[in-house]
Amino acid sequence: MWKIWFPCVLIIWPGLAAAPGARVSRVAMGHPAAIGKGYAAQAVEANASETIPGKSEILGILRKVNSYQLAHPVLDASEAQDPLLHPWPRVTWYTGVMAAWEVTQDPSFLEQSLAYGRELQWQVGKELIGPNRLFPIELWTEIYFAKRDRAMIEPSIKWLATPDPLSPAGSRQWYTDARDTRKPPVPYADSLYGAPALAMLAKATGDKKYIGILNAFFDDVTAALFDEESGLYYRDTSFIGQKTPNGKKIFWSRGNGWVFAGIPRILDYLPQHDPSRERYLRIFRRMAAELVKRQGADGLWRVNLDDPDPLPNPETSGTGFFCFGLAWGINHGVLSRQEYLPAAGKAWAGLTRSLSPEGKVMWGQLVDFEPNAVTRDNTHEYVTGAFMLAGSEIYKLAR
């Protein structure tokens, strides 16, 4: 029978004593950090034949992880003052909470999400980047499908129709990061996790204009950042042509995770006969094939997908998104069960081994925009969200 190996294995490994949140620049990436040597030397190889645990076991894990995060909120000073300033980390956690509700029908998950929506009054937030405002819209629309209360999506509809530089009604490239006025606005891969909000609103309202906005947004970001040679996304245009000291390309794990998790959530709401479906599926399948080649023996991925050596510690936010995407593809018949189930099972086993006894999802890279150092104690609310998304889709594969 399949067993969950709790992270006591991780806790006793030597060589993991880096300062929490330590950053490694691109220049320094050629110098393997001492923190990774213990992990690289003693990582437990996940057995590809591991089976998926039972539904009750997975539900218990999801409840435990969610309860830990509820008891240990992560908010900086500005967020504590105004939760609408940049809610994307918490919203990402709650997309996992809603996914857990949808598959388990545990009412506590839905009630928790409703309480959060009421707290924020269903607003899109005050993010200084347009696509980040899609993250709350995605959550509010998911809750709308559960409760059918139009008030939950009215602020989102209003914002998308308001001429504003950060909205599609006010700017052609509303989805770029224009915060640094010294540089031209740049598209970035993380933004595509917000793209499902547009497919969701199209379904909720029956208005196809949102599909047009979605496709233009996704296609433009993909044209700028998708690397045909590798089948992966650069985080933003500044990474194109950049190499590690080992001569490898820089493909950020979580950056690709945002995309790989975003595409299935688009397809869940895109009309079955929409001509753009095949384009999304083609990218998704290509990414899946490339990602499994880069999976670690322990089931987890590293922060730079093409060059794990400089930063060899595991990373759970990217892994959570990849696990979710692989399991989704199997469950929806767009990825071969025989070919991809071992990778999904290894990823879930690696994720559960990365839990503390209390339910903290460890080894999650802190807020960033490139591959950087990760320590065992690093985590955030979006790390919990990625884990819960993965667990919710693995739940569908369970006995």
Image (spheres, rainbow, N blue to C red):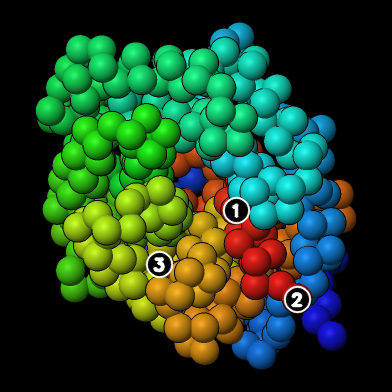
For mark 2, what is the residue?
Answer: 399
Classify the position of the N terminus by image quarter: bottom right
Q: Judge whether 139 appears above or below 374 on screen.
A: above
For mark 1, what is the residue?
Answer: 389
Classify the position of the C terminus by image quarter: bottom right
* Three-letter code for the amino acid on which mark 2 is drawn: Arg
Q: Residues within 10 Å of mark 3 (few under 14, many from 20)?
A: many
At a point 56% along the width and 28% down the height, the residue shown is 148
Does residue 370 appear in this view? no
For mark 3, what is the residue?
Answer: 305
Tell me which numbered mark, 3 or 1, is placed earlier along the sequence: 3
* Three-letter code for the amino acid on which mark 1 is drawn: Leu
Residue 220: give x, y in percent of width and height.
15, 45
Residue 132: give x, y in percent of width and height.
39, 30
* Three-letter code for the amino acid on which mark 3 is drawn: Leu
Instruction: For the residues labelled 3 and 1, say whether their Cβ atoms are less than 8 Å apart.
Output: no
Dot 3 lies on which element? Answer: loop
Q: Would residue 132 be found to the left or right of residue 107 on screen?
A: left
Q: Judge whether 12 appears above or below 66 on screen.
A: below
At a point 31% along the width and 26% down the height, the residue shown is 130
